[in-house]
Image (tube, grey):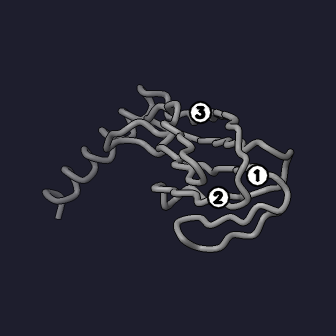
């Protein structure tokens, strides 16, 4: 039994030691942009399954997108957002990589009375 425990103990100490050396603190980051928007409906495409989208009412003629991320061991990046006609593409706000964690949420502000779908599903505007 001690033969099995020693490698597990060594691996545990290695993981803990690496975490202490890298700091393991979380970082919060927010990005925002605004687009001119004359349409009455908006299709939002969100490729980030773990990042929910909240839709709220705002001023006429504009769509704003804000994302707040919390990351450990990864860097937040500026998303490659784009608005083409009535279709809003949300890019990934997290750097690629296998080690670390990055999560967050989007807030999309649309003109009052705009109908919104997120990934094809009707979404209420709050």
**Disc on the earlier residue, 1 or 2:** 2
Residue at mark 1 to residue at mark 2: CA–CA distance: 8 Å
On the rendered structure, is 40 left or right of 58? left
Q: Secondary structure at mark 3?
A: strand
**Disc on the earlier residue, 3 or 2:** 3
Task: From the image, tell me which residue sits under label 2.
Answer: 42
- Name the residue at 49% across, 61% down: 49
- Name the residue at 41% across, 36% down: 95
Residue sitting farthest toward the left: 3
On the rendered structure, is 88 left or right of 20? right
Task: From the image, tell me which residue sits under label 1.
Answer: 110
Q: Quadrant of residue 121?
A: bottom right
**Disc on the earlier residue, 3 or 1:** 3
Residue at mark 3 to residue at mark 1: CA–CA distance: 28 Å
| Rendering coords of residue 126 (x, y %) | 83, 63
Residue sitting farthest toward the bottom: 121
Q: Secondary structure at mark 2?
A: strand
Image mark for residue 27: 3
How crowded pointer 3 is (Cα within 10 Å; few <14, some 14-19, many 20+) is rated as some
């Amino acid at each position: 039994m001690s033969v099995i425990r020693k490698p597990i103990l060594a691996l545990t100490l290695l993981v803990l030691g690496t975490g202490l050396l890298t700091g393991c603190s979380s970082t919060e980051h927010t990005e925002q942009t605004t687009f001119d928007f004359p349409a009455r409906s908006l299709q939002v495409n969100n490729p980030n399954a773990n990042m929910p989208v909240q839709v709220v009412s705002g001023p006429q003629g504009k769509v704003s997108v804000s994302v707040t991320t919390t990351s450990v061991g990864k860097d937040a990046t500026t998303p490659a957002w784009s608005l083409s006609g009535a279709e809003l593409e949300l890019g990934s706000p997290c750097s690629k990589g296998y080690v670390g964690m990055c999560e967050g949420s989007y807030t999309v502000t649309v003109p009052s009375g705009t109908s919104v779908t997120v990934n094809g599903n009707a979404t209420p505007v709050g």
